[in-house]
Image: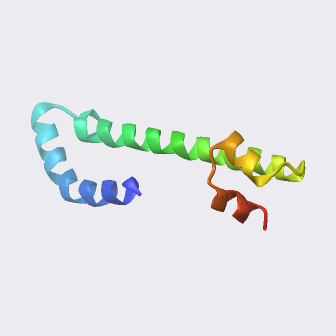
Amino acid sequence: MWWEYHEKAEKLLKPLIETEGKNMGLSLEDTSFARYFRKGGFEEGKEEGVKEKAIEIAKNLLKMNLSIEAICEATGLTLEEVKELNK
């Protein structure tokens, strides 16, 4: 996930950013580095939320005995994903 790369990059760049930021009167949160990774986290979280909602809907449709193919079409999940939920 992107977060692992963020942690590695932050570990390497944080001392430099903090030193340079103090010289320019900025905090780590003011940097484009921080803004870039916050945006990445937001986008990833949004995608995860959409996926979680699709899974929740698929589970409800399975309880209603809708066909797996119809559930795939309705939710955008793959055949394998819906079959896994049906176990």
> Where residue 23 sits: x, y (%)?
9, 37
Q: Residue at x 24, y 41 (%)?
A: 33
Q: Nearer the viewer, residue 43 or 76?
A: 76
Toward the right, the furthest residue is 64
Q: Answer with left or right where residue 46 lies relative to residue 80.
A: left
**Horizontal placement of 14 versus 1: left or right?**
left
* Residue 53 appears in the figure: no
Tell me which residue sits at (13%, 46%) in the image: 19
* Residue 40 locus on image (x, y percent): 38, 42
Vertical placement of residue 68 versus 26, above or below: below
Q: Is residue 8 above or below residue 44?
A: below
Q: How many marks?
A: 0
Q: Position of residue 20 (x, y in %)?
A: 11, 42
Q: Residue 45, percent across and down?
A: 51, 44
Q: Quadrant of residue 22?
A: top left
Where is the C terminus found, in terms of image quarters? bottom right
**Colour scheme in use:** rainbow
Tell me the residue at 60%/43% (across/down): 49
The answer to which of 62 and 25 lies nearer the viewer is 62
- Which residue in the rendered view is the most extreme toward the bottom? 87
Q: 17 and 4: which one is in front?
A: 4
On the question of residue 68 being in view, the answer is: yes
Q: Is residue 61 left or right of residue 31?
A: right
Quadrant location, the N terminus: bottom left
Q: Nearer the viewer, residue 9 or 51?
A: 51
- Which residue does the image show at 16% across and 31% down from the upper left? 25
